[in-house]
Image: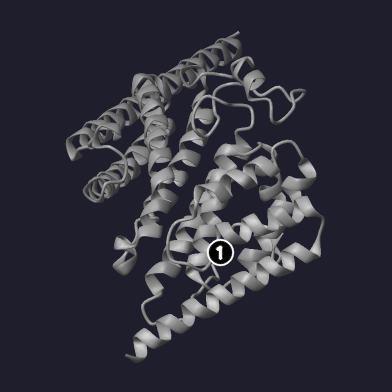
Amino acid sequence: VSIMTSSKFRRALGAVKDQTSIGLAKVGSSTSLADLDVAIVKASRHEEYPTEEKYIREILSLTCYSRAYISACVNTISRRLNKTKNWIVALKTLMLVQRLLSEGDPAYEQEIFFSTRRGTRFLNMSDFRDASTSNSWDYSAFVRTYALYLDERLEFRMQSRRGKRSAFGIDEEEDPQEPPHNYANQQSCPRATPVHEMKAEKLFSRMQHVQQLLERFLACRPTGEAKTNRVVIVALFPIVKESFQIYYDITEIMGVLIDRFMELEIHDCAKVFEIFCRIGKQFDELDTFYSWCKTIGIARSSEYPEVEKITPKKLEVMEEYIRDKSALAQGRKSVKALLEQQKIEEIDKKLIGTTLKKKKI
């Protein structure tokens, strides 16, 4: 009974907080900005069910063509994240951020990337704790890992501003002269360097970034009570779909590295081997995560990629090739050193012979 009473009290308190925030928003700024603040509060209220789509649409509409409104929106969201100790509010706010980054004006990326919260990155939620109940640990953990994923994804996009093909914008160059909201023009931009034309160092750098993004996604697998929570499951939908593109991007780079493997220097072959060892573990985790997602109905099973298995046999073949190539290179060095030594000895003999002839004369 006491648990039920406590739960009802928390819900009532949350509703009061939401109404207070809405009231303050209405009297604290101009009509349009007030509408924006109210929509943000309603999109992230304390009630434990997913956000109504109309509030997200309203926020997208209000910030469609105004950089000032985008900045105001980010500031309001930042304050919301900064103040709340409630996992529902925090997660729904992060879900809103995910939608704004995916469907809103590209200016959101810059505003959020360069914005700070408590002197740290806007999406740094590593200190978040909901201590309201004994079973809130699983939810707090999901909030932290979800925020880390969004932060990593945003950083990847910002580092790849020149590209626009994949879900993370990595293949078509972006024209800096184009307005940020002009999606039609962005689609006709010239293409950047395709993956199969990249040099080895560029490929290694790209792979490192995409693998790190996959690592952040894998960490978002919920635990405990969070696994069956409706809000958590709805939050997973968009990032699971984004992960399909992460997987395809990784396999594309893998294909190029395999094609070039025989031509690479030994130290680069070793890098490829290390990459494949890590990918093998990540793909095993990804396959397990996808199986769970299919079980609970996140996206259609037909949408999921068939996750490749990197077997120990494949890794053994790669490792054996590196050993053989290294031994061959070492043998060549030994032969070269021997030939050079013989050449030096021949020169010495000639010099000695010449000296002796001069002495006889």
User: Looking at this rendering, what residue extends furthest in the bottom direction?
Assistant: 2
User: Looking at this rendering, what residue extends furthest in the left direction?
Assistant: 313
Helix, strand or loop at label 1? It is: loop
Residue that label 1 marks? 125
* Quarter containing the N terminus: bottom left
Choose top left, top right, bottom left or bottom right for residue 135.
bottom left
Q: Position of residue 334 (x, y in %)?
A: 37, 27
Visual colour scheme? one colour
Q: Residues within 10 Å of mark 1 (few under 14, many from 20)?
A: many
Residue at 28 percent across and 37 percent down: it is 300
The three-letter code of the residue at mark 1 reads Met
Is there any visible trace of residue 121 in the rendered image? no
Q: Where is residue 169 in the image (x, y as percent from the top left)?
A: 55, 30
Q: Where is residue 152 in the image (x, y as percent from the top left)?
A: 53, 48
Choose top left, top right, bottom left or bottom right for residue 141.
bottom left
Residue at 72 percent across and 46 percent down: it is 70
